[in-house]
Amino acid sequence: MIIQLEGVDGAGKSYLATHLLNTWRDISPAHEALLVHTGPPGIWDDDDMSLADWRKYCFLRLKAVIDMVEAHDARRLLVMDRGSWGSPVYGQLFRPDVNEDGFGDLGKKYFTLLEKLIYAKGGITAHISPPLETVLVRTLGRAEGEDEFLDQQIGSREKQITDIYNGYYSFIHDNIDILDSYAGSGVFTSSKLISKLPGYEGFTADKTGITNG
């Protein structure tokens, strides 16, 4: 099973990821969970490799993470703190040199392949999206250096975050037909996300314990 968490910086993905691991492990002693944070792949250098080879490298980098999980293994959960969706969203804003088709470093071909792989392994993608005002309060309050990627970009932090926040919604709207793993946008609890996994429909975690109804 795979849960890919996507969303703007400051949305709360890392906090939710930790709760997902704890909730999953509490279901049963047989349950195993792994968290992987997949940040940017680096910067493409056209003197080092062609754009086609760079796209393949970015694809294989993420595929190696996804391949940690066997297809529809109901006991093992991989939580990805950001994954493939960051490529088209951040690519359109910050990587014009690789963004030939609107899908950033991956390109549409490899992005689509990753979507199908996640879905085939019982995976879902949740777009974590609290109100923009909440995100801005969190991110603007961070110390310098906590967001190394954004610190390198030109422009105010508020505009960057707002553009990324809106960029996720635009991306989903424009590409919903190929987003096989999409499980919704908004604020989620760990039990709500687990209930969206195949075989865990109706799952709840309440004060009396964890049940899989």
Image (cartoon, rainbow, N blue to C red):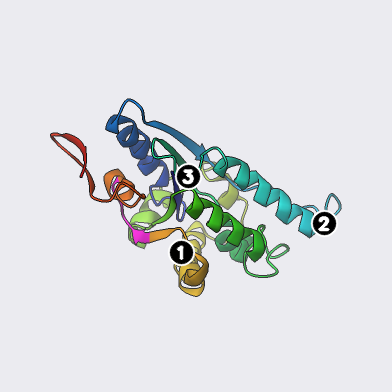
State the quadrant of the C terminus.
Answer: top left
Q: Nearer the viewer, mark 1 or mark 3?
A: 3
Residue at the image point whose x is 39% and y is 41% from the top: 17
Tag 2, which secondary structure?
loop
Q: Which residues are magenta?
A: 184-189
Instruction: Using the image, tell me which numbered label, if any, was put on residue 204.
Output: none
Instruction: Using the image, tell me which numbered label, if any, was put on residue 50.
Output: 2
Tell me if 177 is positioned left or right of 183 in this view.
right
Instruction: Using the image, tell me which numbered label, if any, was put on residue 81.
Output: 3
In the picture shown, does residue 41 fall above or below 92? Answer: above
Is 53 a magenta residue?
no
Tell me if 168 is positioned left or right of 40 in this view.
left
Tag 1, which secondary structure?
helix
At label 2, counting other C-alpha atoms closer than 10 Å, the crowd grade (few under 14, some 14-19, many 20 or more) is: few
> Which is nearer the N-term, disc 2 or disc 3?
2
Residue at the image point whose x is 55% and y is 37% from the top: 68
Type of the residue with mark 2: Ser
Mark 1 highlights which residue? 162
Q: Nearer the viewer, residue 193 or 128?
A: 193
